[in-house]
Image (cartoon, rainbow, N blue to C red):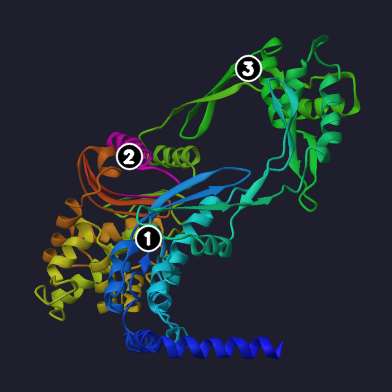
Amino acid sequence: MHMKVNTWIRRGLVFVLRHKRIVLITGGVLLIVVVAQFAYPHGRMLPFVRLDGSRVGSRTQTQIVQLAIDRYSNVPLKLEIAGPAKNSTDKTTTTEVGLGPDTQQIVQNMKAYPWWQRLVPFSLIVKGLTTNQMIITQLDDERFDSYASAQLKNCVVQPSNATVAVKNGSVALVSAKLGQKCDKAALRKSLLQTTLKQKGIDVRLSAAVVRPTRSDKDVSGLLKDAVVLTEHKITLDLDGTEYPISKATIASWLVFADGVKDKKLTVDVDTTPIRDYLATMQPKIYIAPGITTIQTMDGVETSRAEGAEGRGLNFTTTADALKRQLLDGDGTARGDIISLPPRVVYQRSYSATRAGLQALLNDIVADKGDYGISVRMLDGTATSSNGGKRYHPASTYKMYVAYSLLKRTASGEIKWDDAATGGKNISQCFDLMIINSDNTCAEWLGDKIGWSNINNEVHAIGLSNTSTIRGGMYSTADDETLFLMKLQNGSILNTAERDRLLDVMKRQVYRSGIPAGVGVTVADKVGFLDGDLHDAAIVYGKQTYMLTIMSSGSSWAQIADAARQINAQLARM
């Protein structure tokens, strides 16, 4: 072995001595190549390298970064979500998703040329020719989170539990259905694993299966029970005649619901559709009740014509009987036939007296519901029904604010051209508060005067059942007509101040209540708040009188109707 090695060495030395020139030249070339490879700039890409198939050799780092951004920062992206419940496709761009080229990693890979490789002659060219850098991606977390939230929400399909329902007149299984959901981390992974291409990229995401908590098998027993119920032979006995109830009708009475605690499906019999069925059967035994006519004078009955009783079904007890029979099995349920009282119709008359007026007010309150009505004449006589019932005054309290303000303008304490709120003066706020029922001006004026001062001043003129304290306001129809009477007869304000308030009350814009009902000149103030409707008015008709109607749950048309009846009665007196 040693002899062979020695032989090879001798032969090599002989070759070098014989071809010394060639060896020196070759060695020099290789040395120059290695030196050149060590001298190749670290900031430039290797010669002949490719970026996604495009040659970009020898370009600077800045040029590569800009190229990657220009070509791959905003390309079309199609996201396909495939799941057991539904598939969806969203077409957008990588910019919207927050996906873009990782230029730092791309550049680092393309210029990577360690020193030990530089020692290998011609490795610069070989490495460059064999390098094709694909586009590495990265995600902007903020944009990705926004996009992912919308897509994950769109992906979600809640599973449907198996249940039983009535279809085409019979009970049938409604099969359970799978749901699905998508995972944010899986979407991120799918995006980052996709290679960016200039023409666009397709990303596929598989939705996870979400199984229902109740399978078809879980309701099979209940379905059988429901079928048995529909097969029962049930009849309804109406006054001796039996009427068979069809399978489809019985099926319509069944209701299927989840248990409150265990969410287990249950079947029950709902009496609401049974009562609907009984409404169709009642004509077979129905006798319409007659009409009892009652004539009254000033609320006192003067004559009565009795109507005949009718008959019909007691829907509640008969429905309960049918339910019990159905749950028990085959059989007959007897209809509960009851007497129906005659309908009562009043023919009311009222004398042209205060007693007649009182009876009319009582009847209006009885007929219309939650009402308080007060009528007061200029001589102070008053008639009311529920007139002392307290209501929140709503915007009628603004009459009291106006009263306290006018007292202060008369004394000079407040001047009409003083500045108020919202760039307006006191005069403008006063008009808006009454004519347009403006809240901002009313509250500002109340704060300026002082709510306790207003409260004391309305008590001082006899409104003992009224409060203007914020958070505890109330008033009554009797108090409001008393205020209007004192306003009209001039006992609480000077003529100039009284006329100014009456003028704006005559011009207030809400005229669908008392003004619409009486059809004559009216100075009034309305209030409406959370279902309360009020109208406090001075009516300038055949005779001047004060009328306040306070109500809850009514309408302007109903208030107008009440005012019409009262005005007609007073015109007779």
Could you tell me residue 110's position as x and y percent?
40, 75
Span highlighted in magenta in the image: 547-573
Residue drawn at x 36%, y 59% as measured from the top left? 394
Element marked by disc 2: helix
Residue drawn at the location 87% of the way across and 29% of the way down: 327
- How far apart marks 1 and 3 lie (CA) works out to 95 Å
Taking the image as drawn, is residue 270 in sight?
Answer: no
Secondary structure of the residue carrying tag 1 is loop
What is the crowding at mark 2: few (fewer than 14 residues within 10 Å), some, or many (at least 20)?
many
Asked whether 335 or 307 is in front, the reply is 335
Q: Answer whether residue 438 is visible to the viewer in this image.
A: yes
Q: Which x, y percent locates residue 28?
A: 35, 89
The answer to if 236 sits in the magenta stretch is no
Tell me, yes or no, whether the two marked residues, 1 and 3, touch with CB atoms within 8 Å.
Answer: no
**Amino acid at circle 2:** Ala
Q: Quadrant of residue 74?
A: bottom left
Mark 1 or 3: the one toward you = 1
Q: Nearer the viewer, mark 2 or mark 1?
A: 1
Residue, disc 1: 53
- Contact flag, marks 2 and 3 (Cβ < 8 Å): no
